[in-house]
Amino acid sequence: MIPVFEPEIGEDDIAAVTDALRDGEISGSFGRRIPDFERAFARYCGVRHGVAVTSGTTALHVAVAAAELPPGSEVLVSASTNIATALAVYHNGHVPIPVDAETETWNLDLRLIEGLITDKTRAIIPVHLYGHPVDMDELCRIAQRHELVVVEDCAESHGATVRGRMTGSFGDMACFSFYANKIITTGEGGMVVTDDDRLADRLRLLRNLAFAAPRFYHEVAGYNFRMTGLQAAMGHAQLKRIDEIIRRKRTIAELYGRHLAGIAGLQLPAERQWARNVYWMYSVVVGQDFGITRDELARHLQKEGIETRTFFCPMNQQPFLRRQAGFRETACPVADGLWERGLYMPSSLSLDEMTIEHIAHQIARAQSRPMPTSA
Ligand SMILES: Cc1ncc(COP(=O)(O)O)c(C=O)c1O
């Protein structure tokens, strides 16, 4: 089976983790590995502060908590995203309002934002989906006009840029994931980055059970979202290779693009002229004119030993969000369509051209073969 993704763990990662272990940096409360990684990653993003946490999910959770929005606020979120984006809003007692996707980059459609804002809207969480950045220059202009807090969800966009500027450097805060399949990984892990000193202090406080002075006396309700020194050591080692990782992701995308180019009815990932896409996962949309459905294509590829994964079920369709007090019905026809027709391909760094050519060949074969009708 060609898996959708296989993490690449190098000898440098192993050496960094064993060194941390030898130095006893096993927890999230002491040692130099965590602040070293935080500083290096924040510098990479072009901001002043990094606050390392246990996952992308907890990065989003603590970022929304640090924003201190009034209870029951509405927070605009990309409709097409991992559930973690909406969970951060939900678990903080706010209401996620999905913003439909646009058809080319599959990111939230900036033209819809102002029509969704009410007197309860306080923040927006744009997601840089599958590695293509949102136009953050335009999004920040809209957010500024309406005094919205901006939290970027950069779980899939490490190193992606907008007019040469890094995703993660635009929002009041930005949240990264270092899960096993991300651009760089710590196994499980995440980070919030920010340029704002006050927010950075708040994030650090909340991440660490809100310990203050005197110790064990708690003014606010915190969380234990601490990353460990072992994970930070691995993240720092991975960060040293990030340019090479992104170069390989872009080469994989170029190879897929070349071998899939002639196939009718298949929409390939975009790269707007102002953007650098890091192609976290190589994603395609199976059009109505492809000949067979997305599910039929996925089944054919599975039979041929090629693993794929569907796009996200959009936030407007999530049952628990639809039951939430304050839920607002917003039409998301584009995100609904992506859920039905989007598919991502194997995207491991180890993929070679022969394998990509084989996958493209199987896609073309599936298209030209009549599918057996299910009885
Ligand atoms: C867009 C997006 N946001 C948030 C997350 C959550 O990250 P994690 O899996 O590290 O909790 C993911 C991840 O997988 C994601 O793709």
Image (tube, rainbow, N blue to C red):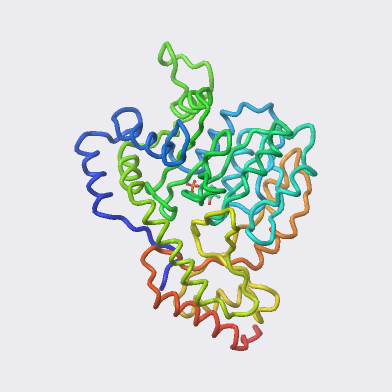
Residue 272 position in % (x across, y down) = 60, 58
- Where residue 270 sits, quadrant-wise, is bottom right
Q: Which residue occupies the foreground of this view, 329 or 259? A: 259
Q: Which residue occupies the foreground of this view, 90 or 363? A: 363
Residue at 46% from the left image edge and 74% from the top image edge: 306
Q: Which residue occupies the foreground of this view, 136 or 81? A: 136
Left or right position of 176 against 75: left
Which quadrant is home to the C terminus?
A: bottom right
Residue 342 position in % (x across, y down) = 61, 66
Left or right position of 280 against 137: left
Residue 249 position in % (x across, y down) = 44, 61
Which quadrant is home to the N terminus?
A: bottom left
Above or below: residue 356 compared with residue 125: below
Looking at this view, name the residue that lies furthest to the top: 214
Residue at 41% from the left image edge and 64% from the top image edge: 348
Above or below: residue 337 compared with residue 82: below
Q: Tag count in the figure?
A: 0
Residue at 65% from the left image edge and 28% from the top image edge: 69
- Where residue 44 sits, quadrant-wise, is top left
Residue 230 position in % (x across, y down) = 30, 40
Q: Which residue occupies the foreground of this view, 274 or 102? A: 274
Residue at 62% from the left image edge and 88% from the top image edge: 370
